[in-house]
Image (cartoon, rainbow, N blue to C red):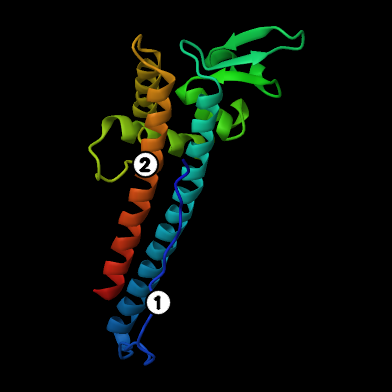
Amino acid sequence: MTLEFRVQHDVATDASPAPTRPARTGLRGVLDRWGDRRAAARARRVDDRIRELGELGHLLSEARGVVERGWIQHAWFTYVDERGRTRTATSAAALDVQGRPLVGACLVGAVVSAAGGPHAVHSPRVQHALDLVWHALAADEGTPVLWCPAPDVRMGRVRDLTSWNDASTRTSTDVAGLLLTAERVAVQESTRLRDGQVARSRA
């Protein structure tokens, strides 16, 4: 199952031009222009985040595929070394996996693999994807995603995800299901941002 990520745009049904605010002069004019620039910058940031959420949704879908092909516990990756032996790698030895055939991955390892491999572990794509996965695991549905937490908080979240993955009762179906929920979080967050942008434009 693959979720669809689309950016929708309102289409005007009235052919007449939108009313424009009369240009003001002096200090009021300066404040108007400053406000317009701030609004335009905010709109660009929202557009960028919506585009990123679409990309993150696809990354999480690919991570789900990694888990479905081979899921492991108590390590990040299982791979085949140069001698054809199956080896495991923890986070400390993750770079040993780069360029090797991947046999299996844990929850966090699957996200890293889908983003391009261990060299991408500190990239914004991986960090933001893990923000979505943690939100799917621990936050109330419908609440805004907290992006870019403090480094110690982010490390705590990775430990949360690792501990959850390694629980004795955990199954690969559970892990794939959490990634699917994270994909839905990406869609919901995109919709929330887009609705907020439309509401501001009509205010």
User: Which mark, residue 147?
Assistant: 2
Q: Amino acid at mark 2?
A: Trp
- Residue 151: image quadrant is top left
| Most distant residue in the right direction | 83
Is residue 148 among what the camera can see? Answer: no
Tell how many labels: 2
Q: Percent x, y for residue 149?
A: 35, 35
Q: Quadrant of the C terminus?
A: bottom left
Name the residue: 71% across, 12% down: 81
Q: Judge from the rendering whether residue 11 lies leftward or rightward of residue 22; answer left or right.
A: right
- Residue located 32% across and 83% down the image: 29
Residue 133 or 200: which is nearer the viewer? 133
SS state under label 2: loop
Amino acid on which disc 1 is placed: Val
Residue 109 percent coordinates (x, y): 52, 23
- Label 1 or label 2, whichever lies nearer to me, is 1
Residue 140 shows in this picture: yes
Q: Which mark is residue 11?
A: 1
Structural distance between the alpha carbons of marks 1 and 2:
30 Å
Q: Position of residue 91 (x, y in %)?
A: 53, 16
**Residue 196, numbered label:** none
Question: Badge 2: few (under 14), some or many (20 or more) residues near its Cα, within 10 Å?
Answer: some
Give above or below for 27 relative to 22.
above
Give x and y (percent) for residue 183.
Answer: 41, 41
Q: Earlier in the sequence, mark 1 or mark 2?
A: 1
Which quarter of the picture shows residue 177? top left
